Amino acid sequence: MPETPHARPLPPHIAAQLRSAGGPTDTGGQAWEGRNLGEGTSHTHQFPEDPGTADRQLERALTAWREGRLGEQDVVAALGSARVFVPIVARVSQSHITEDGLVSDKEADMALVSLTASDGRAALPVFTSTAALQAWNAQARPVAVEIRRAALSAVQDGSAMLVLDPGTDPAFVVRRPALWAVAQGRDWTPSYRDFAVDDAVMRAGLGLDGVQAALAGPGRGVAAVRADGTALTGGGEGPELTVTLQLRAGMSQDEVRAAVERYQQRLAAEQVMADAVDSVELRLTS
């Protein structure tokens, strides 16, 4: 099982956007006050002419990715300003025991659904269409939002990733660095293709006794896997990056431990690793 990464501080520009996000509105900026989520389809509140179908550009990108014709960078780029749906479910806020000893629900709130990744981190499910959401959970209400607002909401709620269309084969995971990029409306480059990450990985090993080379590459968990066993290009939940540390042959166990510890300290001090990398595995060779 991959190790759960330590929480990282939010970049100042993300923190500033969250401070202005407010509390009395949903992720789409619509006020909760006076809203009726019990009748009809709530996704029509902000998008009254919305038929609930998938954004065409995003749908094409996801289809091509699932067929092995596009990579995860292309799918994240296709998110752009797409409209997606977040699931809202009823959650009992007050209940009491009747004279007959039965539990009676008195009040219920509407709450966002949260998923848990295999490493324990929280993830926000989002859907490209109301049909996809209803197929996943027929009891959930779809609320339409722009993808950027959904990403900001995920950051605000402490979610480390978005999961696009859970229940499909396969779902597409937007990891933390891509999530932040979507929230900011900027381009995203996977860490295993980022030259700044390559430089940081190599730089952390320079001059270290026993370290001959340090190389970055895709992690073993970067790929999502279809039900038929086909590994796709990205879209998995991690580990995202593998750092291969080549050590001098013949080193003692204590020497290896000291070299690895010093390297990890140096690598952790590189800001680009905190900003651009979701999760890292270290592999030793000689």
Image (cartoon, rainbow, N blue to C red):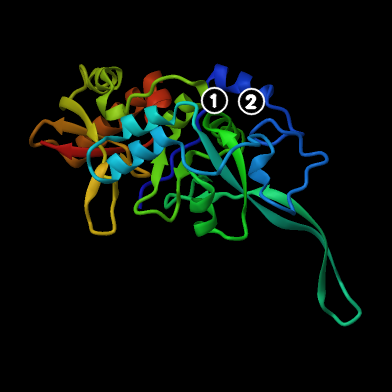
Question: Is residue 260 left or right of 11 when viewed as pictured?
Answer: left
Which dot marks residue 18?
A: 2
Is 120 above or below relative to 186?
Answer: below
Q: Residue 34: give x, y in percent of width and height.
A: 83, 41
Camera-side residue: 5 or 262?
A: 5
Q: Are marks 1 and 2 in contact (CB under 8 Å)?
A: yes
Which residue in the structure is indicated by mark 1?
A: 10
How many numbered discs sit on the rendered protein? 2
Q: Quadrant of residue 235?
A: top left
Q: Is residue 115 above or below residue 271?
A: below
Q: Secondary structure at mark 2?
A: helix
Q: Residue at x 58, y 60 (%)?
A: 138
Q: Residue at x 56, y 22 (%)?
A: 14
Q: Residues within 10 Å of mark 1 (few under 14, many from 20)?
A: some
How far apart, in angstroms, are the residues tagged by discs 1 and 2?
10 Å
Residue 61, given in percent of the width and then of the height, sits at 34, 36
Query: Is residue 170 positioned above or below 85 on the image?
Result: below
Q: Which SS class for mark 1? A: loop
Extreme-left residue of the structure: 249
**Residue type at mark 1?**
Leu
Of the pair 191 and 183, the residue shown nearer to us: 183
Q: Quadrant of residue 21?
A: top right
